[in-house]
Image: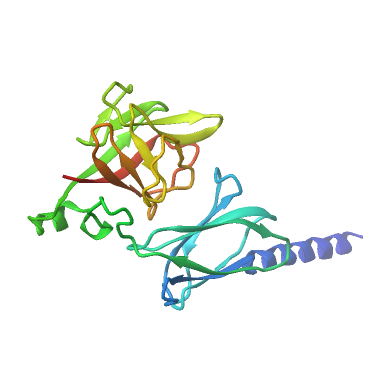
Amino acid sequence: MAFRIVLLAFAAATILAAQADQCLIRGKVTDTSSASIAKALISVYSKDSTLLAFRGNANYNDGTFCVSDLSPGTYTVKAWHEGFRANRLRDVVVRSGETTNIGIIQLDVVGCDAREIMCCLQVATPEVAATLPDAPVEIAHTDLNLPRVCGADLSIGEVLCPPTKDADMVFVEEHGALLLRPVNGARMDSDCKGAYRDQALRIEALGAGDDFCIKTRQGHTSHVFFEGDDVLHSTTELTLWIVTKK
């Protein structure tokens, strides 16, 4: 009897090891011309984006990736590479012992979708901006070390805490979600295509490669890039690049 128990335990361990090595999510990252993007960063989140389940680089030079060691469930898969806008595929279902092939995730080159915004990610560093004396942008690198309710005046890159009448956005928690909310007449556009609204932007799972646009209360238009670690529910610090047309 003891020998049989040992065999059963060994078999169970073998099955678990095989599942850990198996591709549970498989896909490929390309640009919009269908060219492969090697070594893209792949992040996998729980369905509501509050739990980071996996992070790693696409492990083949042809842009393909394999994610293993996930529990059965529904996930969101995010792909990003420097110089591109991040893209997400939601409601990816993982079943025990099966491979879910999500196909191709295409990434757009980061650019300026709104005509009134004159910026690109490639110039959003002080070193590069210094080589472009006539560049029509004002660049601020702003670390927002914020408690749950604080604000920032995007026109001058100044952190305001608590929010005052000068703030253009506030970082808040509402109904269990982390949000950036425009205030004092400012408006946000989550994809920078010119549809500015006073609606808040849910920011869980946003990070490197994600951006949004805001029209400030003074009428300035700013292109805002997230930087660093993705936003989780425990986040109290945001790092943003803010690029404002003069």
- Answer left or right for 69 relative to 39: right
Describe residue 214's horizontal placement relative to residue 122 as left or right. right
Would you identify the image quadrant in which residue 115 lies? bottom left
Residue extending furthest left?
Answer: 133
Q: Is residue 6 above or below residue 212?
A: below
The picture quadrant where one finds residue 103 is bottom right
Give the left or right position of residue 157, taking residue 207 as reference: left
- Residue lying at the far right in this picture: please name it: 1
- Residue 139 in the image, given as x and y percentages of width and height: 19, 47
Screen quadrant of the N terminus: bottom right
Chosen colour scheme: rainbow
> Residue, x 27% and y 57% (percent of image)?
121
The residue under the point 20% across, 53% down is 125
Could you tell whether 1 is left or right of 16 in the image? right
Q: Nearer the viewer, residue 40 or 97?
A: 40
Q: Position of residue 129 (x, y in %)?
A: 14, 55
Q: Is residue 195 above or below residue 69?
A: above
Given residues 93 and 198, the one toward you in this image is 198
Q: What x and y, as percent, mark residue 67?
A: 57, 64
Residue at the image position 38 percent from the left and 63 percent from the top:
81
> Where does the image place residue 84, in percent across and percent down from the top left?
36, 62
Picture quadrant where residue 179 is located: top left
Q: Quadrant of the C terminus?
A: top left
- The residue that appears at 67% across and 68% down in the rendered structure is 99
Closest to the observer, 136 or 229:
136
